[in-house]
Amino acid sequence: MRILVLGGGWFLGRAVVSGALERGWEVTTFTRGLSSVPVPGAVAVHGDRERPEDLARLAGEGPWDAVIDTSASELSPHVVRSGARTLEPVVGRYVYVSTVAVYEGWPAEPLNTCSPVWAASADAGPEAVRPPDSASGINPGYGRRKAGTEHAVTETFGLSRTSLLRPGVLLGPGEYVGRLPWWLRRTERGGVILAPGNPTRRVQAVDVRDVATFALDQALHVGHQVHNLGSPIGRETMGGFLQACMDVTGSTGELLWVEDEILLHHGLRQWTELPLWWTHPGVSVIDSASAVAAGFHSRPLAETVADTWHWLSQGNTPVPHRRWAKHGIDPAKEQAVLDGIAYEGALRSPNP
C-alpha cells in the first residue's frame, strides 16, 4: 500500500504516518516543513498547498493508492479543490478528515450522518470564514467552509472514491491546541480548581490515535463512506475527565464545580477559557454508529489523559501554534472568579 498524507508533521497527520509505517506501507508526506520534524521512514516532500507549482511537483512523486488529508482545517474550499484536481490522476482514493461542524444543527441538537449539512460551494474563498461568536465560541463560517471543502473533494474524486470523516474534538499525545495539556498543568498546580458546570455533563472527545487508525482503514475501503467519529454517547463525563487529570498528575487540589449561569455571569468564554466547557445541548450527542460498524474503536478518555501526561512528562512539547494562547483561563482571572463565588452556591463533587 502506497499512501500520501497531506500534513504528516503534526498531531493527527503524524499519528497517521506512524500508523501507516507500522503496517509496512510506503508513505509520502506533504508539509511546508516549517515547524515539525519528518517521521523517520516516510518520504518528505515540502511545499505549500496554496501554490499550484508545489502541488504539480508533488503529483510527480505519485502514484498513490490513497491520500489522507489531515491539513485542510484552515484552507478555503477552492484551495482544497485545486489540490484535489492536481492529485486526482495519481491517487486512487481520497480520505478527508473533516469535522462535525459541517452539520447545520451542530452544536445545538443531536446529530447523525443523515443530518443536514451546510450548503456551501466548492468555489468559496477566504470570505467563507466568519469570526466566532465571542460568548458562545460558535463559528458558523467554519462549518460552512468545511462543508465546502467536502464538496471540493467529492466533486473532484466522485463519491465512490471518497471517505469523509467527521470527528469532534481530538485529544491525545502531541496535541498542539492546548485543551488537554492546559487541564493537566492546571490540575498539577493544585489549589482550588474552577470546574465548569456539572460533573455529569457528557463529553465526546476522541483520541487522535483512534482517528488515525480508522483513517488508514478507510484508505482500504471502496465506495462512498461518511462517518462521525466520537466516543460512545454518554460514556465520558466532564467529571470523569477532570478526575482523570487529577489522578495522573497526583494533584492535591480541589475541584470546585460552578454552575454554568455563574460562569457566564462572570464573562467566561466557552470552549477556550475552560477548555471543553460548552453549554450547547448537542455538542456531545453525535452518533458514531456507522463508524463503529465499519470498525472504529474509541479508547477510554482516561487512557488518553494518562498517555498525554506521560508524553508531556517525558519533556515533549507541542509544535508552536497560535491557538495555544487562546486556551485556558489566566490564573489571576480564575482567582478573581473564585473570590467572587460563595462556596454555598457552588456544586461540589470531589469524586465524580
Image (tube, rainbow, N blue to C red):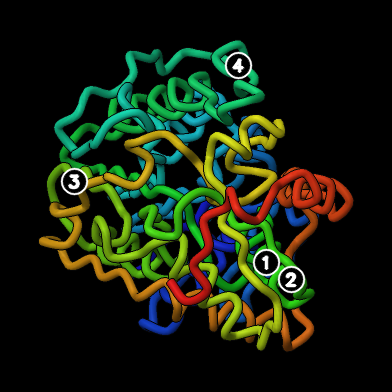
- Residue type marked 4: Arg
| Residue position for label 3 | 225
| Residue position for label 4 | 130
- Element class at badge 2: helix
Q: Answer with mark 1 or mark 3, whichever residue precedes in sequence.
A: 1
Say few, some or many: other residues with alpha carbon within 10 Å of mark 3 (under 14 / 14 to 19 / 20 or more).
some
> Could you say which disc has been placed on residue 185 in the image?
2
- Element class at badge 4: loop
How far is disc 1 from disc 3 in space, using C-alphas? Answer: 32 Å
Vertical comparison of 156 with 162: above or below: above
Vertical comparison of 133 with 205: above or below: above
Residue 130, percent from left and from top? 60, 16
- Element class at badge 1: helix
| Residue at the spot 77% in from the left edge and 44% down from the top edge | 340
- Are the residues at dot 1 and dot 4 in contact (C-beta closer than 8 Å)? no
Vertical comparison of 138 with 123: above or below: below
Q: Quadrant of the C terminus?
A: bottom left
